[in-house]
Amino acid sequence: MKPSFRVFVTKHHGGLYSAVLLRRFRTLFDRPPPASMAEDVETALQRLAPQAALATDDSDEAARYIWTEQLELRRIEIDIHPGRPDPRGYVIAGATVPIRLAYAAAKLEGATLYRVIVPRFDWSFVAEDLDAVPDTIRSLVFAALVGDNAASLYDLRRELDEQIVEWSPIEAPIRTTKKSGDERTPAPTLEAVAEDWVELARAGRLPPTVGVDPTFDQLLPALDSKRMPNVLLVGPRGCGKTAIVRRIARALLERGRAKGPKHRVWATSADRIVAGMVYLGMWQQRCLAMVKELEGGADLLYVDRLTDIMAPMSDGASIADLLAPAVIAGQLPLVAECDEAELVRARQRQPALIDSFRIVRVPEASTAHVIALLEPYGQRLDPKVELTHDAARRLIELAAAFRRDSAFPGKALAFVDYCSLHKHARLELDDLVRVFGAWSGLPVDLLSPDKALDTKAIAGELAKGVIGQDAACSTAARVIARLKAGLDDPQRPVGALLFAGPTGVGKTELAKQLARYLFGDAERLVRIDMSEITTGSAIARLITPSPAGTSLADKIRRQPLSVVLFDEIEKAADAAFDLLLGVLGEGRLTDAFGRLVDFRMTLIVMTTNLGAADPKPAGFSSDPDAAPDPSAAIRQFFRPELIGRLDAIVAFKPLPPPALERIVELELAKLRLRPGITARNLRLELTPSARTQLARLGHDPELGARPLRRTIEDLVVAPLAERMAKDPSWRDATVRIGTRGEPADLVV
C-alpha cells in the first residue's frame, strides 16, 4: 500500500469527533500521540495536520507514524472487576462491569507476525497468532485496573462509533524563527484552544469598550515593553476585568501598526484547554505545547478565571502546575482574573505563582461612571438602545437592590444588551421597571416604588395555590414585603424559612408558589433532596461543577435569583449543615474549585417533619388548632447557630376536609387546561358530592393530600381517556362528574 497515516477516529455521544494519530510503538518517557477534536471528522483532521507535521519532522519519528500495512479494526468484550483505593490496599470488587474495547491489527511485511495496537490505552505489541490477542488484552486491562484509577476504566463502558481512517501525508510547514514585522511564529496548539483578540480587534469582531478606564491607564506603559508582565486583575464579578483585557488587545493592535513587537493576546479558559483530551496525559501534553509556543516570545496568554486553572484534575495536577515554571521565570506572560477571596486562597495554594503577578485591583464603577457609560454603550449596539436620565438612575437603583451577585458596570451593561436583543429602543422610567422585571423575572409590583404591596396582598397571591395554610402564607409574605421595602440584610439571602409540619400539607407547594410569585416561573425553584445528602461524596456533588451544570453551585451561578428548597433537612449528614451555615450566614458558598457562589439574591426554604408526630392522624384533622407546636422538637434537633440564622419557623397545620375539597377544585382546574380537554372543547363539571368523595379517597392519614393527584388520575382522567379513545368524534360536550345515584357522565 501507499505510505500514509492511520488515524483512530471516535464519534462521542455528545456529537464531537476525536482523531488520534496511530504509531507503531512507544518509547520510554514518550509523549501522547498527536490528537484533536472537532464537530466533524474533516475539521478534526484539519486540526490534526499541524501536529502531525511537527511530530514527523524528524525522520526517525516519521518511521513510527507512516504505515504501509493494512490495519484491521477488531473489538473485544471484557468483564472487569472495578476497584477502589483503600488504606489496607487496592480493593477489587466482586461485581463485574462490562466494557468494550477496539484494537487494530496488521500483518507485518515479510513475517508471520502481527502488530497490535489498543488506541484507548496507547498500547502496542507484536503477536504470533491473532487468536491469542483477546486474552493478552484482558490480562493487560486487569493489570492496569490494579494500579490505575478505576474511574478511567469506567469511561470505557460506553459503546462508541470507532473507525480507522487512512490519511495521506501532508506537506510539513516550513519552521521559521521569529522575525520582525507581521511575520508570526506558527502556534498550532494555541490556534486550536484559544482566540487571538488582537486579530479579532483588527477584524472588528472584538466586543466594544466605551469610556475611559483609570485602571487600564496604569497598564499602558507596560504595553510598550518587549515583554509584557504577568498581570492578575482582582475585583468582583462585573467590575470590568475582561473589558480591560479587550482594551489591552486594542492598544497592542495600534502599537503594532506603528512600531515595536507584534504582540498577540491568546484568550482561552480551563475548559477549552482540556476539551477533547480523553486519553491519559493528553491535556498535560497540550499545556506543555502551549508553553513551548509562548515562551520567549512577545505573545500574551489570557486564561480568564485563575481558580479554574488552579483546580486539580483527576490525577491531582492542575493547568497552573504546568504553566507556573515558565510564568514564574518570566518566559510566559500571563493575564488572569479573580476576586479578593479567591486571591487569598490562591496565595495559600501557590504563593510563588501569585508573587510573580503584578496585582491590579479593579474597583466597582461609581454611579456617575455607570450613567456616563450607558449612552455610548447603547449607541454602539445594533439595534441601538437609549435610556432617559431618570430611567438610567432607576436602573442603577434596581440593579443594586436586586442583582447583588454582580458589580457595576457589568450588570447595567448586561441589561442594555438584553434591551437591544429584545428591541427596546428607548426606555422611559415606566418602561424601565417593566423591562427590568422581564429581565430579572421579578414582579413589577415588587420593583415599582409607586405600587403598594402589603403583606396581606402577597399572602393572598400565595394562598391561591396553597390551600388551608393562611398563617404560613402570611409569614412567607412578610419576607417578600421586607425585600420590597429594602429592609433585608444585603449580605444574607433574601430570606431563610423553615417549613415544619406533616407530609402532604403544602410545604413544597408553598416553595413553588414563592418561585412563581417572585420570578414568574416555578422552574426557578432549585430543589435539593437532603435525604440523599448523607455521605461525603453526595455533599461534594453540591459544590462540584459539572459539564451538565447540575450541582447546586452550578445552578445558582447560572441563575442567582432563585428559590432554593432543602427538602427534609433533618435527614442530611452533619457536614451538610456546615455547608448550609455559610449560605445562611453570609449568603455565599465556595465550590470545589475555590470559587465563590453568591446566594444573596436567593430565598432559602427548608422543610422538616420534626414535631409533626401526633396521636391523631397526621395531615388530616377536623380541628386545625390541634396540631402540635414543632418549635421544641426543632430546637432540640438542630444546632443553635442554624436556628439563629432563620427568619422564621413556619408551622403547617393538618388539612381539614374543607381544605381538601378546595384542593380537589384546584387540581380539576389544572385538568381543564390539558391539551386533550381543550382541543375537544370539553367542559368538566363536578358535583358537591363528587368533590367530597374525591377529597376522602385522595387523603391518606400518613401522606396527607399527596395521593389526591393520583386519585384524580385514576378516577377521572383514566375514564375520560378511555372514552376519548373509543369515540374520536366526541367533542363540544359537558362532562358531569358525580357519585352513584346522581345523574352523571362519569361516576367516582
Image: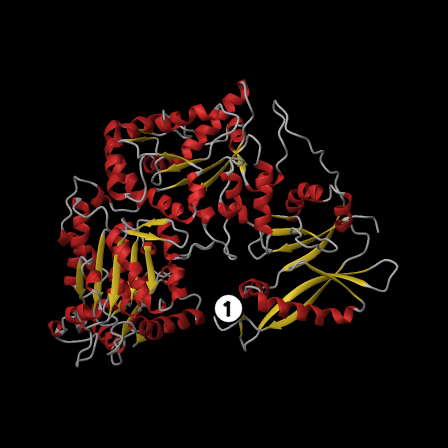
Residue found 60% across the figure and 41% down from its top = 189
Residue found 16% across the figure and 49% down from its top = 482
| Near-viewer residue (667 or 148) | 148
| Near-viewer residue (572 or 29) | 29
Q: Amino acid at mark 1?
A: Pro
Residue 451 visible in the shown view = yes
How far across and down, in percent of the image, does residue 657 sit?
18, 73
How far across and down, in percent of the image, does residue 608 sit?
24, 68
* Left or right of residue 660: residue 549: right
| Near-viewer residue (714 or 71) | 71
- Farthest residue in the top direction? 258
Residue 9: name its quadrant.
bottom right
Residue 559 visible in the shown view = no
Residue 652: name its quadrant.
bottom left
Residue found 21% across the figure and 45% down from its top = 446
Q: Which residue is mark 1?
A: 85
Question: Can you say which quadrant of the picture contains the C terminus?
Answer: bottom left
Residue 469: name its quadrant.
bottom left
Q: Is residue 733 above or below residue 544?
A: below
Q: Is residue 38 above or below residue 84?
A: above
How far across and down, in percent of the image, does residue 389 sit?
25, 27
How far across and down, in percent of the image, does residue 113 sit?
82, 64
Q: Residues within 10 Å of mark 1 (few under 14, many from 20)?
A: some
SS for dot 1:
loop
